[in-house]
Amino acid sequence: MDDTNLCTCPEILAMASVPRQNWCEPYDYETSLKEGTLFPCLNLPFYKAEEGDSNLKSTSIASSPEETQRESLMSKLSAISFAINDLTLYLDTHPDCPKGLPLFKELLQKRLELLTEYADQYYPLTQISMITGNKDCNCYGWGEGPAPWEGGLI
Amino acid sequence: MWSYEKRLQFPVKIKKTCPKTAQLIISQYGGPDGELSASMRYLAQRYSMPVKKVGGLLTDIGTEEINHMEIICAMVYQLTKNLTPEEVKTAGFDAYYIDHTTGLWPQAAAGVPFTSLEFQSKGDAMADLYEDLAAEQKARTVYDNLLRVIDDPDVRAPLKFLRAREIVHFQRFGEALEMTKEKMDSKNFYYFNPEFDKTMYKQEL
């Protein structure tokens, strides 16, 4: 076969490619939320965002012990829920990952427990937590607790 | 369908009123590379995606972008919540105030209203995925620019988080591009449009 006219370019032309992420050991969940990703290998910060932010943790605006406690439970729930958000996208493109899937189920279980605990102690954050939490509570929806855009506290 | 959960994806607890900062950040609500635009882009593109898992990814990222829109709106709200009449006049928020008081309305930093012209849904998987990759990069640039000019740590924490999400989403769209390519002819990816020339592309149902 005469292949003198065939292109010898080693790669496919006119098409970009992005390497697939391999599983990398996740951050703890509080760090994940702070950094915006569960995966250290995808944490690629901007130099201007580093300056003076070494202790960049959301500061509390809680004004009573009750608020402090509620804020602490909300922080736990936010961290676990965000780990689920990030893992969701990872599993969308790695549905067969033997490490990702069991962790996903474990986190979903933890999240269910935290939502229930929150509903038990304060007020339901989702409709389903009206029955998984304190069943004697007659809380319904928007009357209880601050609106999320108030910063979780009023 | 969607359901609401009464909390933000990332906490926003801003203590200091700053209408000038609100006026910059609002761009990520209704601006050309904002979260509303991102959400509408992905949720519009997903219906005709030839690879089912890519349609799923667009749904999940489109949903996350709505969370981000809510974070941005919460920031604008908290930055202007206790605005004084004096600050209305002097702090660079006067033009917005005249039309919207301190209500939330999707616009770019320069006042241009939100428009669907800011994004595309092209009905071509390659074209759409490249648009999505580019969109994540452009949004990252906006967050970089915001982080250059804003000092308040209460504002920087959510901005840093949102910037990090752009990079993760870029990676996932890149993987979605690879998944789509796998189902096509690598000798010529442009021989047909997998979203339209259905007889040439074996669709998953």
Image: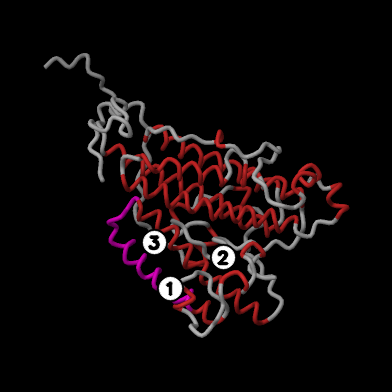
Q: Which residues are magenta?
A: A93-116
| Quarter of the image with the N terminus of chain B in it | bottom left
State whether discs 1 and 2 lie on one chain.
Answer: no
The amino acid sitting under disc 2 is Arg
Residue depth check, mark 2 versus mark 3: number of the one nearer the observer: 2
State whether discs 3 and 1 lie on one chain.
Answer: yes
The amino acid sitting under disc 3 is Glu
Number of callouts: 3
User: What residue is pinned by disc 2?
Assistant: B7
Q: Earlier in the sequence, mark 3 or mark 1?
A: 3
* Residue A85 in view, yes or no: yes
Residue A110 drawn in magenta: yes
Q: Secondary structure at mark 1?
A: helix
- Provide the chain ID for the residue under circle 3: A
Q: Secondary structure at mark 2?
A: loop
Using a 10 Å C-alpha cutoff, classify the residue at mark 1 as few (fewer than 14 neighbours), some (14 to 19) or many (20 or more).
some
View extreme (right): residue: B86
User: What residue is pinned by disc 1?
Assistant: A112
Residue B161 drawn in magenta: no
Residue depth check, mark 3 versus mark 1: number of the one nearer the observer: 1
- From mark 1 to mark 2, how far is it between C-alphas? 15 Å
Is residue B7 toward the left or the right of residue B25 in the image?
left
State whether discs 2 and 3 lie on one chain.
Answer: no
- From mark 3 to mark 1, how far is it between C-alphas? 24 Å
Discs 1, 2 touching: Cβ within 8 Å: no
Q: Position of residue A74 (x, y in %)?
A: 56, 72
Q: Is residue B105 above or below residue B32?
A: below
- Provide the chain ID for the residue under circle 2: B
Is residue B8 toward the left or the right of residue B55 in the image?
right
Q: Position of residue B114 (x, y in %)?
A: 62, 40
Disc ID at residue A25: 3
Prevailing secondary structure of the magenta residues: helix
